[in-house]
């Protein structure tokens, strides 16, 4: 019976098999693992059978690079390799004298993982886990001699590992537990090479009873003795340009012929977002027809006078890829001056690589920050100048990549030195038509704990400012009315009033862009909606458009958060919600700490 436990060894019993399918069947189907293998897979998982060595062998070959006169770019790529010149290469081949048959239920194999980690812990583990650096260096062909880990070898492994990394993430647990896990297969799995016409497929599988992840390997066709085991490193990607981009870590190429321009997406893009969110627009607008009624439509029909604490389609502000898209209404394909240049890695990968390679060719700074579309608190957010790293990060979860601010305005801390800081403003949206936007006069500040420099990119306390979620990390707090005189003392040519005017101008332009088109292309005009947002921003040094000689402090909007945590606001400003609600519901701003922006 297909999917059963017949054959040598059997499995752990019919009931166990049914439980296995109930627990792991969805993941196996999603990975397209044929059901004929499931019974033997359970048997091997249950008994921890790693029998790939009975069927396969690793063959070492030496690839001699031919000299190609005039191909300077290829020569430069070769020089960057850990072992330039004649490179040792490994291949996995079928060694069993009878070959391998795809219809054999036993033709599924477990691959162990040599290293499993989260990115923020990689450096620390390479330095501290005995033998890990030596094993990874050997697996990646990096020369490493001696017992004590050194920073140079660690850096090489951290760069090369993106050619070997695989990823999965847990579907349950806290936000921290759902952050993607990365792993490197053992020497056998890591030696399997790429092919556009693969002979095998692989997929990660988290085996619940043991709480261990393995990689599962199965054939896509029959193989004879001596044939190579290969897999597609861009599995499932049919578009040839995207395949070229995805395979760039292993197959050097340039995409400079692709335009890096990123115009605003089409109307269909926003309609698709609305449909994906399974939302219907409220009455009063001619919405697209969807089968299920959801909250905004239901409330507008049954309880039209109920006030809501959000606007339909406000995800255009609060989800990072949408924020970048609508902002192009202000600044065109390049985006506005107040938003770092941002690319959607799912839909704009070729444009990003072209832009990265153009900057690289011009010798411009190429530090970038990768962020999930819809996570806060800097979770799964990474700073890097490695193109390979960014391309591979795309596989873990939907992400945007934004230009990292390489020249931030810094703040002097007596105990640390010049550090990064960001500013949070509470912004109140009273209505869309007409657009009425307020900001709370008090703002909040967050500081890095280490002096800023464009190095140690995985040093969280140097490059990030969110310190209030880890009790073991120092939290620097400066109240806004203490900050302003300190800031003006450090930057006497830049009065805070002028800086804040530029910040408010950026807020106004953002919300004007977000409300300039009807829903779902813009925030929906719903009379019963009110909303409170937190806008996080930094300041960067830029040149004045009118005069390249004078430097200006240019606000950089980082993200917009819906329904922010206002505990600190209430603690230090007891009238906070009185002021907020007076503006939102009573249209009263007199004698309150609220300023009208639009």
Image (cartoon, helix red, strand yellow):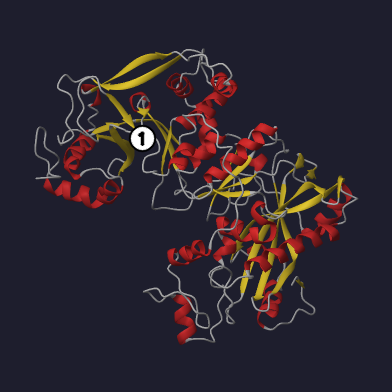
Q: Quadrant of the C terminus?
A: bottom right
Q: Residue at x 73, y 61 (%)?
A: 506
Residue 416 x, y percent position in the rendering: 75, 39
Number of numbered tags placed on the structure image: 1
Residue closer to the observer: 475 or 256: 256
Query: How dense is the environment of label 1, judged by Cα within 10 Å: few (below 14), some, or many (20 and up)?
Result: some
Q: Tell me the residue at 50%/61% (across/down).
A: 269
The N terminus sits in image quarter: top left
| Residue 216 vertical placement versus 539 (above, below) | above
Q: Report the side of 264 relative to 578 (left or right).
A: left
Q: Is residue 538 above or below residue 227?
A: below
Q: Is residue 160 visible?
A: yes
Task: In this rendered view, identify the residue nearer to me: 182 or 349.
Answer: 349
Numbered disc 1: secondary structure? loop
Residue 583 locus on image (x, y percent): 70, 78
Residue 382 in the figure: left or right of residue 483: left
Image height of 263 relative to 459, above or below: below
Could you say where residue 63 lies in the image, as x and y percent from the top left?
42, 15
Residue 118 visible (yes or no): no
List the residue tagged with mark 1. 232
Foreground residue among 466 and 478: 466
Q: Which residue sits furthest right?
A: 493
Q: Percent position (x, y) of residue 85?
A: 51, 13
* Quadrant position of residue 135: top left
């Amino acid at each position: 019976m297909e999917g059963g436990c017949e054959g040598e060894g059997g499995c752990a019993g019919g009931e166990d098999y049914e439980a296995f399918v109930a627990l792991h069947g969805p993941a196996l189907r999603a990975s397209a693992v044929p059901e004929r293998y499931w019974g033997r897979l359970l048997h091997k998982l249950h008994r921890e059978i790693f029998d790939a060595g009975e069927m396969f062998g690793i063959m070492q070959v030496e690839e001699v690079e031919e000299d190609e006169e005039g191909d300077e770019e290829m020569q430069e790529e070769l020089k960057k390799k850990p072992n330039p010149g004649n490179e040792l290469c490994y291949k996995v081949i079928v060694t069993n004298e009878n070959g391998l048959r795809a219809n054999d239920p036993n033709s599924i194999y477990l691959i162990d993982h040599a290293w499993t980690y989260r990115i923020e812990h990689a450096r620390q583990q390479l330095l501290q886990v005995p033998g890990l650096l030596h094993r990874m260096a050997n697996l990646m062909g990096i020369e490493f001699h001696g017992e004590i880990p050194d920073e140079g070898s660690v850096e090489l492994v951290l760069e090369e590992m993106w050619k070997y990394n695989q990823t999965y993430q847990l579907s349950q647990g806290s936000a921290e537990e759902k952050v993607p896990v990365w792993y490197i297969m053992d020497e056998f799995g890591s030696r399997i090479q790429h092919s556009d016409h693969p002979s095998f497929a692989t997929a990660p599988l988290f085996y619940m009873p043991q709480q261990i992840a393995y990689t599962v390997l199965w054939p896509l066709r029959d193989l004879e003795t001596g044939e190579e085991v290969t897999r597609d490193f861009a599995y499932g990607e049919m578009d040839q340009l995207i395949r070229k981009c995805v395979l760039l870590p292993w197959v050097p190429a340039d995409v400079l012929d692709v335009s890096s321009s990123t115009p605003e997406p089409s109307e269909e893009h926003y309609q698709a977002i609305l449909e994906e969110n399974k939302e219907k627009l409220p009455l009063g607008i001619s919405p697209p027809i969807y089968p299920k009624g959801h909250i905004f439509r239901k409330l507008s029909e049954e309880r039209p006078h109920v006030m809501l604490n959000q606007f339909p389609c406000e995800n255009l502000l609060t989800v990072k890829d949408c924020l970048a898209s609508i902002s192009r209404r202000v600044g065109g394909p390049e985006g506005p001056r107040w938003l770092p240049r941002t690319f959607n890695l799912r839909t704009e990968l070729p444009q990003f690589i072209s832009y990265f390679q153009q900057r690289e060719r011009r010798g411009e700074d190429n530090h970038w920050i990768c962020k999930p579309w819809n996570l806060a608190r800097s979770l799964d957010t990474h700073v890097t100048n490695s193109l390979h790293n960014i391309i591979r990060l795309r596989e873990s979860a939907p992400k945007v990549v934004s230009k990292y601010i390489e020249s931030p305005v810094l703040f002097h801390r007596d105990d640390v030195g010049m550090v990064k800081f960001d500013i949070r403003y509470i912004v109140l949206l009273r209505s869309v038509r007409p657009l009425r936007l307020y900001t709370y006069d008090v703002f909040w500040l967050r500081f890095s704990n280490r002096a800023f420099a464009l190095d140690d990119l995985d040093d969280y306390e140097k490059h990030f400012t969110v310190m209030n979620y880890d009790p073991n990390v120092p939290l620097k707090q400066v109240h806004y009315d203490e900050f302003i005189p300190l800031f003006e003392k450090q930057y006497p040519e830049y009065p805070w009033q002028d800086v804040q005017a530029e910040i408010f101008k950026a807020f106004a332009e953002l919300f004007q862009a977000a409300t300039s088109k009807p829903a779902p292309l813009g925030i929906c005009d719903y009379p019963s909606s009110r909303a409170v947002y937190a806008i996080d921003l930094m300041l960067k040094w830029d040149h004045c458009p009118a005069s390249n000689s004078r430097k200006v402090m240019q606000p950089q909007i980082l993200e917009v958060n819906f329904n922010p945590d206002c505990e600190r606001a209430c603690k230090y400003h007891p009238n906070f919600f009185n002021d907020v609600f007076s503006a939102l519901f009573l249209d009263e701003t007199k004698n309150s700490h609220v300023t009208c922006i639009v």
